[in-house]
Image (tube, rainbow, N blue to C red):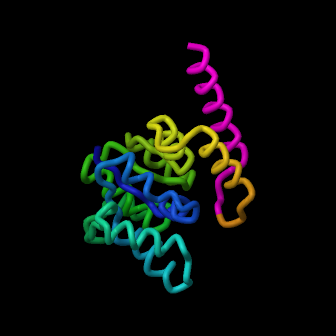
Amino acid sequence: MRVVADSGPLMALGKLSLLDLLHGLFEQVLVPRAVHDEVVVRGMERDHADAFAVHLAVRRGHLLVVDLDETRVPVDLRALPLDRGEKHALHLALRDAADLVLLDDLKAREEARARGLIVKGTLGILASAHRRDLLTFPDVEAVIEGILLRDDLWIAEGLCRQVLVSLRAERQAAEDR
């Protein structure tokens, strides 16, 4: 499965010390250089722990950094009101016919879907990790509840609650079988 990641899920999973979930879920995750620089280079300058986690994942080969020629990014993508990393993530996903693009930003997610891409965010990654038995239900529940208490993660409370309700329903259905 070919997967492209933007900064939001990388930073969130790094802050949650769960970046290794990507390696457990996906054979290869491509990261545009612009995203790498945003997360790792600028993050390390500010001593952000998630920057070091992403840097280590790159060093281990779990994330593959891809250089893109700015002039090859289509004009319509460059004109979007998104940050450079999001534009590059969309371009790479479209160029390489990615099976999935990891995005948290709502506008970027909408644009990706409008262009026919399948999108998953941080919460979707956590849910997938639970479904693949990489996280137990109590663990995924604790992580999502923990997201709500943090001021360095910007994931809507309503969305967190919605995912928890869905996972609880799946768990109940599995127990009823």
- The quarter in which the N terminus is drawn is top left
Horizontal side of residue 172 vs 62, given as left or right: right
Task: Please give the name of the residue rendered at 67% of the width and 48% of the height, measured from the top-left corner.
Answer: 142
175 inside magenta stretch: yes
Q: Main secondary structure of the magenta part?
A: helix
Residue in front for this viewpoint, 78 or 50: 50
Residue at image point 67% right, 55% down: 147
Q: Is residue 27 above or below residue 165?
A: below
* Rendering coords of residue 25 (x, y %): 39, 46
Residue 18 on image: x %, y %: 51, 57
Name the side, left or right, on which 108 lies relative to 56: right
Left or right placement of residue 116 versus residue 96 in this view: right
Looking at this rendering, what residue extends furthest in the top direction?
177
- Point 63% across, 51% down: residue: 143
Q: In this rendering, is residue 89 above or below 26?
A: below
Name which residue lies at 63% across and 38% down: 163
**Viewport quadrant of the C terminus:** top right
Q: Which residue ends up furthest to the right in the rendered image?
A: 149
Q: Is residue 9 magenta?
A: no
Residue 150 place in picture, x, y as percent: 71, 61
Q: Which residues are magenta?
A: 153-177
Q: Position of residue 93 (x, y in %)?
A: 32, 52
Kindly indicate the quadrant of the structure image that contains residue 152: bottom right
Give the total of numbered labels. Answer: 0
